[in-house]
Image (tube, rainbow, N blue to C red):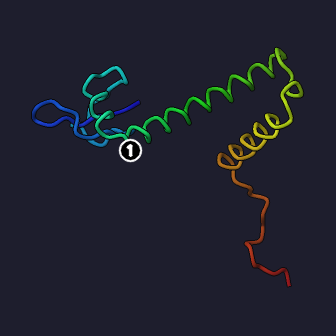
Amino acid sequence: MLYVLRDDNNQVCAVSDKLLSNEWKRADMEDEGLKLFLQNNPEISTEVMASYDADFIRVLEDVIDLLIDKQVIQFTEFPDAVQTKLLNRRRYRDNLLSPDITQLLEDGDNIF
């Protein structure tokens, strides 16, 4: 979801993925003012697309997990490279959501 800030002429002058104040209004990708702003600011457009891509990747991961859980496909049917990527992303996501609390010593701490 994107939010836009419009100037006095109702032209989009800034874009954010968060609601920053009451002046910011929700906009979808079909908004002509937003399209024009992104066309004129390719670096921002690239960031917006990267954010959408990351969200879409998460959706694909969830769909793959659902298909595996429902036994529509088997994990081992994926090529080895795909299996490795899926496992790495799952581990990374799990580590972000629940940091390892079993590590009792800090790095560099000594027992004795």
Q: Residue furthest bottom?
A: 112
Residue 21 relative to residue 80: left or right: left
Query: In terms of secondary structure, where does tag 1 sit?
Result: helix
Q: Does residue 23 appear to the left or right of 29 in the view shown?
A: left
Measured as percent of width and height from the top left, residue 35 is found at: 31, 27
The residue carrying pointer 1 sits among few (fewer than 14), some (14 to 19) or many (20 or more) residues within 10 Å by Cα, namely few
Q: Residue furthest left?
A: 8
Residue at x 23%, y 37% (from the top left corner): 5
Instruction: Please give the name of the residue rendered at 28% of the width and 37% of the height, measured from the top-left corner.
Output: 40
Q: Residue furthest right?
A: 76
Q: Quadrant of residue 61?
A: top right
| Residue 112 position within the rendered picture, expressed as x and y whole percent measured from the top left | 86, 85
Say which quarter of the image contains residue 86.
top right
The image quadrant where one finds the N terminus is: top left
In the visual, does 72 lie left or right of 95?
right
> Where residue 10 appears, x then y in whole percent?
15, 30
Amino acid type, label 1: Glu
Q: Which residue is mark 1?
A: 43
User: Which residue is drawn at the image coordinates 78% and 63% (left, top)?
Assistant: 103
Q: Residue 26 appears in which quarter of the rendering?
A: top left
Of 20 and 36, nearer the camera is 36
* Residue 23 x/y as whole percent: 21, 37
* Tag count: 1
